[in-house]
Image (cartoon, rainbow, N blue to C red):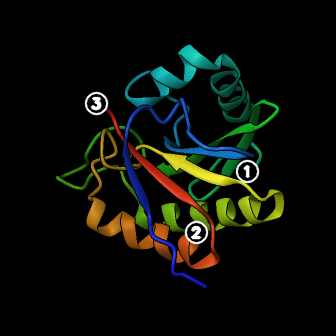
Amino acid sequence: MEKREINYIKGDATNPSGEGKKIIVHVCNDIGAWGKGFVLALSKRWIKAEQEYRNWYRDGGNFRLGEVQFVEVNSDIIVANMIGQRGIKSNKSVPPIRYEAINKCLEKVGDKAGEIQASVHMPRIGCGLAGGEWKFIEPLIKQNLIERNIDVFVYDFE
């Protein structure tokens, strides 16, 4: 069996390519804020992803770092709201990204993708407002998704 790699493509992660079920993943903060970055494109396309995130925050429960909320936005697309950043601002030069939380989230996404036979689609998660570095995130994607034989597509917006 051939070894899978991450598929890097130019395009829009809110318009995932390919057939079958798809999970679109992105990184959220742990304070319930939604309004900058990739989430704006998500909301424009599927307001349900934002509404469910806001309900999750309001209701409390398991709303914390490392948790994932899966929101079915149509019959073959699920948005994974992954809580992988602490707040929204850097604190003493420490960016909001929390790699350990991203790792836990991606493990849960891997479980879900395997369960429903879905491919996973994303922008370069954690590298925008969260302040993360791809060199730390890419190995987490490989460990939690690629090594589990899940097709992964990373979109660089044109």
**Can you name the residue that lies furthest to the front here?**
1
Q: Position of residue 50 (x, y in %)?
A: 62, 24
* Residue placed under numbered mark 1 in the picture: 62
First-in-chain label (1 vs 3): 1
| Quarter of the N terminus within the rendering | bottom right
Determine the image quadrant of residue 150: bottom right
Per the image, label 1 sits on a secondary structure element best described as loop
Q: Position of residue 8 (x, y in %)?
A: 37, 53
Q: Position of residue 59 (x, y in %)?
A: 77, 33
* Amino acid at pointer 3: Glu
**Can you name the residue that lies furthest to the bottom here?**
1
Q: Position of residue 74 (x, y in %)?
A: 78, 28
* Amino acid at pointer 1: Asn
Q: What whole-number distance in Å separates the C-alpha atoms at marks 2 and 1?
A: 23 Å
Per the image, label 2 sits on a secondary structure element best described as loop
1 vs 3, front mark? 3
Instruction: Tell me, yes or no, whether the two marked residues, 2 and 1, touch with CB atoms within 8 Å.
Output: no
| Residue 136 in the image: above or below residue 85 | below
| Quarter of the C terminus within the rendering | top left
* Residue placed under numbered mark 2 in the picture: 145
Q: What whole-number distance in Å separates the C-alpha atoms at marks 1 and 3?
A: 36 Å
Q: Residues within 10 Å of mark 2 (few under 14, many from 20)?
A: many
Q: Residue at x 58, y 62 (%)?
A: 106
Per the image, label 3 sits on a secondary structure element best described as loop
**Can you name the residue that lies furthest to the left here?**
93
| Residue 100 in the image: above or below residue 71 | below
Q: Residues within 10 Å of mark 1 (few under 14, many from 20)?
A: few
Q: Nearer the viewer, residue 71 or 155?
A: 155
